[in-house]
Amino acid sequence: MTFSKTKLVALSLVIGCVGLGIGIIIGYFGIQESVPTENESIHKKLMKEISNGRIEQNLWDITRKPHIAGRDTDEKVLVERIKNDWENAGLDSVVVHPYDVLLSYPLQSDSNYVALLDKDGNEYEVSQKKELVIDEEQNDPDVVNPFNAYSAPGTPSGDLVYVNYGTIDDFIELNRNVGISTSGKVCISRYGKIFRGDKAKHAEQYGCLGLILYSDPADYTVSWAGVYPSDWYLPPTGAQRGTLWVENGDPRTPNYPSISSAWHMSEMEIPLPKIPVTPIGYGDAWKYLEKLGGAEVPESWRGDLNITYRYGPGFNSHTESKIKMYVKTKNQAAIIHNVVGYIQGGVEPDRYVIFGNHRDAWVFGAIDPSSGTAVLMEMVRAFGKMVKQGWRPRRTLVFCSWGAEEYGLIGSTEWVEEFQKELQSRTVAYLNVDSAVNGNFTFRGSGVSSLRDVVFEAAKLVDNPDSAEVAAGRSTVYDTWKLKLADNDNLDIPYFGGLGSGSDYATFLQVIGICSIDLRYVYDYSTDLGSYPVYHSVYETFELVSKFVDPDFKFHQAVGRVWAEVGRKLSDSVVLPINCRLYAKDLQKKEGSLITEFGEKMSDHGIDLKLLQDAIQMFATAAEKIHNIADALKPNDFYANRALNDQLMQLERAFIDVNPLPGRISYRHVISAPSLHNNYGNTAFPGLVDAMFDIDADPDQEGRWDEVRRQYSILVFHILSAASTLGPVTLEQK
Amino acid sequence: MTFSKTKLVALSLVIGCVGLGIGIIIGYFGIQESVPTENESIHKKLMKEISNGRIEQNLWDITRKPHIAGRDTDEKVLVERIKNDWENAGLDSVVVHPYDVLLSYPLQSDSNYVALLDKDGNEYEVSQKKELVIDEEQNDPDVVNPFNAYSAPGTPSGDLVYVNYGTIDDFIELNRNVGISTSGKVCISRYGKIFRGDKAKHAEQYGCLGLILYSDPADYTVSWAGVYPSDWYLPPTGAQRGTLWVENGDPRTPNYPSISSAWHMSEMEIPLPKIPVTPIGYGDAWKYLEKLGGAEVPESWRGDLNITYRYGPGFNSHTESKIKMYVKTKNQAAIIHNVVGYIQGGVEPDRYVIFGNHRDAWVFGAIDPSSGTAVLMEMVRAFGKMVKQGWRPRRTLVFCSWGAEEYGLIGSTEWVEEFQKELQSRTVAYLNVDSAVNGNFTFRGSGVSSLRDVVFEAAKLVDNPDSAEVAAGRSTVYDTWKLKLADNDNLDIPYFGGLGSGSDYATFLQVIGICSIDLRYVYDYSTDLGSYPVYHSVYETFELVSKFVDPDFKFHQAVGRVWAEVGRKLSDSVVLPINCRLYAKDLQKKEGSLITEFGEKMSDHGIDLKLLQDAIQMFATAAEKIHNIADALKPNDFYANRALNDQLMQLERAFIDVNPLPGRISYRHVISAPSLHNNYGNTAFPGLVDAMFDIDADPDQEGRWDEVRRQYSILVFHILSAASTLGPVTLEQK
């Protein structure tokens, strides 16, 4: 076959052009810089990498010594250990942030106690100064004797009054209805129901000279099982340590970080307790309560000691005796540390997904918080391994080991205060684990409602660590959660509650508006325990955990896996998995409760409830729209994705008031805050609801209702502001 | 020539491959989606489009009627006009935002006045109730008679005392050194030097029964020229209206927007003046001051009336007479409006460059603010035309016509309060023009130092409207600015000063930390005028402007051109023209002044000045680094550009304190704020410097120095926070 020159040229041209055309197509579509998308396949690798054995080893290592905040066992030994581990794990950087803060300790050489005083002033029925050593593991000179941090020192004596749980309602009931004034008395309150700092605050408000806190068997044991060492329930000698500080962060530097240039408020001005407060076990409490005089208390005030519970004041059988408290607890400045490690995002390094867990423990802390710390360390190692294998998340992962949480979220609060501007403009979410395993009944996630689904989805991907549950056909963490802790409004899904102020998420969420979650395995709430039984006692040991709670550390592992997957999803998704529709539903639900409880009364006082309804409706509409826009976004439209994600990220910020809530130093979240009368609790619409509290008893009706109206207007404004945050960015729809 | 099949295939393959290769190269490099970059060529078109003739027409139209806030001439007629104009100009959307706010008016039917009272209580030497109509243009029933907004009503009488400018130093001098108590007296102060609201505040603090404000010829006329109508200086009958509100926004809703759900503070609780205050002309003031008794005042207290200035109290020649004030000014709620228009950004619609000018005037407002409004309207038209021709800026342009600025920046403040969350997270800069042309001496830009260069560069691009200057070889606005108003520290560049609280930038900058500028043409400051002479009088008319200030409207045009170019640059640059190095220099300069003035005293009280120095050094280093990174950025690296721009944008936010400055309701900027004793002034490190004010005279030395230390620590922290904002986004360098 031959070709003429002309034909040859023509053919060459055709072939050349075809080649050119194919080339252009390949060049344009084939070699475009790859659009960064989520790497979903990593989740299986990541989960597989998280090992229960290593978590067990971590927990063993951490709990060899007590590691209270401000002491070297925590601030040097563990800080160094974690820093080194994280550097070795392959994190891009690890930074230790020290803060000089005010802590509080008992005098080990002159321990706190409680006693009876006879009419000659002689002490008898003296309480134990230390918890009994049941297992040799607990016999460590560094065990800090039971105390309540920031108690005032002092040795008050007087008539004893029993105040039940020491809630605001209990004090109102006693002083207003029962007719027993607590003023000038020494009071005894059982632990449970509310944050102990609020018990102390109420006692002080109601004029008590001092407050004794004890753990009643009703709240820390069960009738069908023994106490430690035969089971994990609280023995009579166990006493709950714990802080009394009702705000967060270094008490001397409200709103500002305790860095070297910090100014310190004088201790006189800080709203720390002005009365002595100290904890005892129920073995000791029994000695005082069984002698108490006065009328019998009603059913709801009775604990499970084998006595007749009475109010007091004073003693029946020892009528001339007084109760005496001997409290030498003292405030003391100390340096605490946060360890913060980073895996820098490959696409958006200026967007953060933050994991946090505190490191300090009252004693060994095998549950609180070291179960979480052991998990955190293993999770970081697993993430580091993914990075070493070439993976990198879209956004930056930040891992935080907080110091001095037990004293009042001090490490996390100081860090948030120091970096508040950057965190507020860059943080996608804060993911907290405090005690990873409070029990082995079911997994429980709590948090801001917009993050509910990302937790649900992660829980669905994690194998159930409970073999009985697996055998019953519930193969995932989610399945058991849904069964054992269902949502009351919809039994088909698990319960996902809000956040109070119980752990390090509080400052992130309540002060700077970062959407947050808290994850843990929990015990069976139907037992009505005040907390897991050995909480903050010397018996929170590795032995107890490995014997009674999680022998195979599979529950720990499951928490780590859910935590890692939630963080992976938030850091790697192109569109952030923040669900505004759920937020809208949550607002509607909160509004419903508000109307049920206060609606009629508010209307009667001229408050237009429609303003709130309309604002929430506007929010719901904006939520609907933004998700429709999100669904239609193309992954390669970088700017549109970023802009939309910024709106989703900023949503929570819109609920932060420029002023703190009334009566609080720093909480500013108008939708959800710790209750004013229970820091652990969660109040919807806190400014408004606090203003409504016991309003009928206020002699200044006009002033009080004006405050309600003011709070109502602030609430409505912030919901409108949130709707606008989600609305079109050129604001024109407002 | 013939080819074998084999050779042919080979040749085809070669040609095909070459074609393919070229195609791939073309496809990859040639047809990439175009990287959005700045369109620099638009600036010439834009400038050319801005017409002096149209500005003149706008000014004529706007000034046909007085248009005070809260009345239909402003809130209906002008609002509708602007809205329609902007819609026709091709803006993407135009929204009118109404707010229900507290304003204040005199009683037209029963005007305010001042008089002498003889011993029988008969009035004589009664002041003019209205300014004299000099030109028929001023004869309008809607002219509001001279008054000071938010004055308390009342008719005090008593001995008269002259308090010079009514500064805090003047009151201290009188009461502490001269030995004349102002308590229980009626005081008279000349206008000038400081904000009139502060004069009233000082008078109230120092116990005055009432305050008369007048414009002294020394401050509102010159010796070498006549007064209006022969020149633009203030005639004897001219009186300066003006607000006394020392904070910003609706006085009833501090920190929150006056939307329909707003809660209103009771007027009793608002820190509005509690004494009557009213303005008079120097024709009237002469009648009272020439009769005044007491010692002669020193040189610096003397004005230019042909009298001997004396302190009082009481009168020389009319010893039994008292001065009486008759003030019927009343607060009144009204609806005010902002008009806000948008040109949506083509690449980053969620980033805003905001232009603002207020619309309301005390009377005709031909200078304040309508000279600016006329320019704004023309500039918007020009931008709209660019859009119609296919241009679209990278970021969104927002144009704002504010209501009720004269009463205390009310329109802008309520809007910022309503959209604070979105504005804080999305706004690049706020660009203000109030009175565009206060004079024809030189252009003057003021603002946050990081925006200095973008203003300089724009001023270099704009033709000099002053033909004499052009003839002298200074062809640009910048050239004359540099000559006539040079920087004292560097005569080679123009002076670019900071911002007080004189116009609508205040809430943007001082409350939510948006970097801001203010642009205007000014009169010759060497004349020592208190302001341009006819300021806030009935004589601020189109006739006066077109006759004495800017007959060709070329100065107006020049302001419009600089304004447009600054906004264009900020909205269209790939990397934001925010200069952090200049901010660092500015901090160093402020630090130098602080050390000079207070350094020794602070050191003596144990304050470590090195903490501040180190913080500023850290800031300077971070500034240097971020600009080096910016210089190396590739325009097509979308995310890196966005992230870096976010850091630059957030810089100013880092200086906003979570708490307001002491003694202020809402100002939170720790680097620069209106002076506590002069709202128009600008104080560096205001929290600290205010705490140092007159410190030696404070009997509570310990408490006062503790406050200084507290403020010092807040200052240092915020500078560190700003350094960290500019630092690496993964925070590891801290």
Image: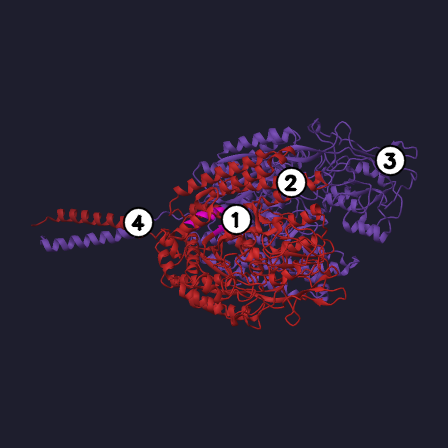
Chain colours: A red, B purple
Q: CA distance from mark 4 to mark 3?
A: 89 Å
Q: Chain of mark 2?
A: A
Image: magenta residue range: A445-457
Query: Residue B116 has which mark?
Result: 3
Q: CA distance from mark 1 to mark 2?
A: 23 Å
Q: What's under tag 2, amino acid-wise? A: Val
Q: What's under tag 1, amino acid-wise? A: Gly
Decide: is A121 above or below A13. Answer: below
Q: Nearer the viewer, residue A129 or A339?
A: A129
Residue B270 lies left or right of residue B487; in this view the side is right
Mark 2 nearby-residue class (10 Å; few <14, some 14–19, many ≥20): many
Residue drawn at the location 20% of the way across and 49% of the way down:
A16
Q: Chain of mark 1?
A: A
Mark 4 nearby-residue class (10 Å; few <14, some 14–19, many ≥20): many
Task: Tell which circle, 1 or 2, labels the residue nearer the N-terminal end.
Answer: 1
Q: Chain of mark 4?
A: A
